[in-house]
Image: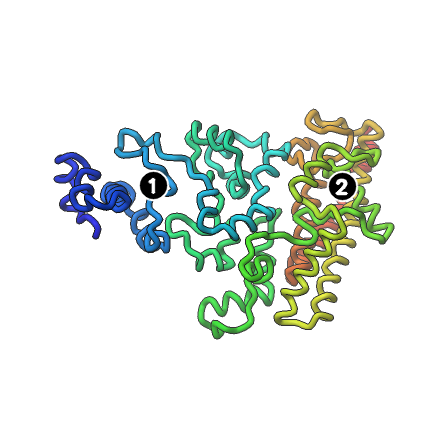
């Protein structure tokens, strides 16, 4: 039973929605509270109410107070709404919550806070969560962080689960669609969506979704490969940055990966681990053991064999590894050219850099054109090469990735010559 809009002002004048709800449901305090919330919010935020009515939550006695507390009772005390703690979801969805906490998405907030570049965003980006926070908000926050965000009025982004199960429908069906991943996994530095959507996997999935192919056709979504059997621990062998420890047995590749890890600040220019090494390890930014890497790769092969043979699956993933190797050789050469400019005092170390060496995690703190070109080569073009390689999209592997990296290297060599001649 829901209030008709025509009666709502009358009940408000006679003592408020909770008083009306108590009169209607005197023996059921949960129903009283729920109906009072619905009565008011049908006028104030009607689409929240309509979404909630469509949700499984509303059919399973999960009322508003479960998530928002019972201190907010009128328009005068909105500030008493309980900040949402995603752990509340875990009281019912214990397995999913445990898996989520073990996965990379749970570490997203802490990983962003560790990035030097995140602190350089404009206030507008931070307050509106339209910069890095827009996606990294998925991560778990400490009680103090939740309190601080609440005090600042930044309630959007406190939760984690609703990043995929959008409130207030919290739909499982929505979270199973590839578009649920698109909000974050898109753009020049995260082109997973573009690489996937243009691949044969993505084309088949989107055609099946639109009814052009039978619904039961083999058409892998993001969730098929990265969340097999619905697991919420989302993890890949190479990780976002495409680096790993221990290093590959291939010596030229190992040297290239070492150079990239130096530019990520994981190793100092002398090769010794830095504080970022511990951050990478703690936040699982990269696989730091052979066992961790092998476990993630074996899991992916297992998923691939739902449609392909084991031999084919292992072969194709190995080709993705080769794509990383070739991209890394180009990347390391470019890093070396810029690092030599620091060594020879031709480039001055920016103030935010820990060492006189390129720092990919400082982003816009790199003031010179050659430094910016190097950064774009890494974060945009190397990423495209890797994502295109593993998502089986030649456009991203070749034209947006490998080809752009080659052009970057040519430009960096040219700019380095000009800087040396100018000196």
Residue 114: give x, y in percent of width and height. Answer: 63, 34
Answer above or below: position of 411 versus 180. above
Give the residue at x 52% y 52%: 95
Q: Earlier in the sequence, mark 2 or mark 1?
A: 1
Q: Which residue is mark 2?
A: 261
Q: Nearer the viewer, residue 357 or 149?
A: 149
- Residue ID for mark 1: 65
Q: From the viewer's perspective, is residue 4 above or below residue 74? A: below
In the rendered view, does 217 fall on the left or right side of 280? left
Q: Where in the figure is residue 134, as x and y percent of width and height?
A: 51, 41
Secondary structure category for the residue under label 1: helix
- Camera-near label (2 vs 1) is 1
Q: Position of residue 264 (x, y in %)?
A: 72, 39
Q: Residue at x 76, y 43 (%)?
A: 260
Q: Work out how far the residue at label 2 is from the one at label 1, CA to CA, in angstroms.
A: 47 Å
Residue closer to the observer: 415 or 321: 321
């Amino acid at each position: 039973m829901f209030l008709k809009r025509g009666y709502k002002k009358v009940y408000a004048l006679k003592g408020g929605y909770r008083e009306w709800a108590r009169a209607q449901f005197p023996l059921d305090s949960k129903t009283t509270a729920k109906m009072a919330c619905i009565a008011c919010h049908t006028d104030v935020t009607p689409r929240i109410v309509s979404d909630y009515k469509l949700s499984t939550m509303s059919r399973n006695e999960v009322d508003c107070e479960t998530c928002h507390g019972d201190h907010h009772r009128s328009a005068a005390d909105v500030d008493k709404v309980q900040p949402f703690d995603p752990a509340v979801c875990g009281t019912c969805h214990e397995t999913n919550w445990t898996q989520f906490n073990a996965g990379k998405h749970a570490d997203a907030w802490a990983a962003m806070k560790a990035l030097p570049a995140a602190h350089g965003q404009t206030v507008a980006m931070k307050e509106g969560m339209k910069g890095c926070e827009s996606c990294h908000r998925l991560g778990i926050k400490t009680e103090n962080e939740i309190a601080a965000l609440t005090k600042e009025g930044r309630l959007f982004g406190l939760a984690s689960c609703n990043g995929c199960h959008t409130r207030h429908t919290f739909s499982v069906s929505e979270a199973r669609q590839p578009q649920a991943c698109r909000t974050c996994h898109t753009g020049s530095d995260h082109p997973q969506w573009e690489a996937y959507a243009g691949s044969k996997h993505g084309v088949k999935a989107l055609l099946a979704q639109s009814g052009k192919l039978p619904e039961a056709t083999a058409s892998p979504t993001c969730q098929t490969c990265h969340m097999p059997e619905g697991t919420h621990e989302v993890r890949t062998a190479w990780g976002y940055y495409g680096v790993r420890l221990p290093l590959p047995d291939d010596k030229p590749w190992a040297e290239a990966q070492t150079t990239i890890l130096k530019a990520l600040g994981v190793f100092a220019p002398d090769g010794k681990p830095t504080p970022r090494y511990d951050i990478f390890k703690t936040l699982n930014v990269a696989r730091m053991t052979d066992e961790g890497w092998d476990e993630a790769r074996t899991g992916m092969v297992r998923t691939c064999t739902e449609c392909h043979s084991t031999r084919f699956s292992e072969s194709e993933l190995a080709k993705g590894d080769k794509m990383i190797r070739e991209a890394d050789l180009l990347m390391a050469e470019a890093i070396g050219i810029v690092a030599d400019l620091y060594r020879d005092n031709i480039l001055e170390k920016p103030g935010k850099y820990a060492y006189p060496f390129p720092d990919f995690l400082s982003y816009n703190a790199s003031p010179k054109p050659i430094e910016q070109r190097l950064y774009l080569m890494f974060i945009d073009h190397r990423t495209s090469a890797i994502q295109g390689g593993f998502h089986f999209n030649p456009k991203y592997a070749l034209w947006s990735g490998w080809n752009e990296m080659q052009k970057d290297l040519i430009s960096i060599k040219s700019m380095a010559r000009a800087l040396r001649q100018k000196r």
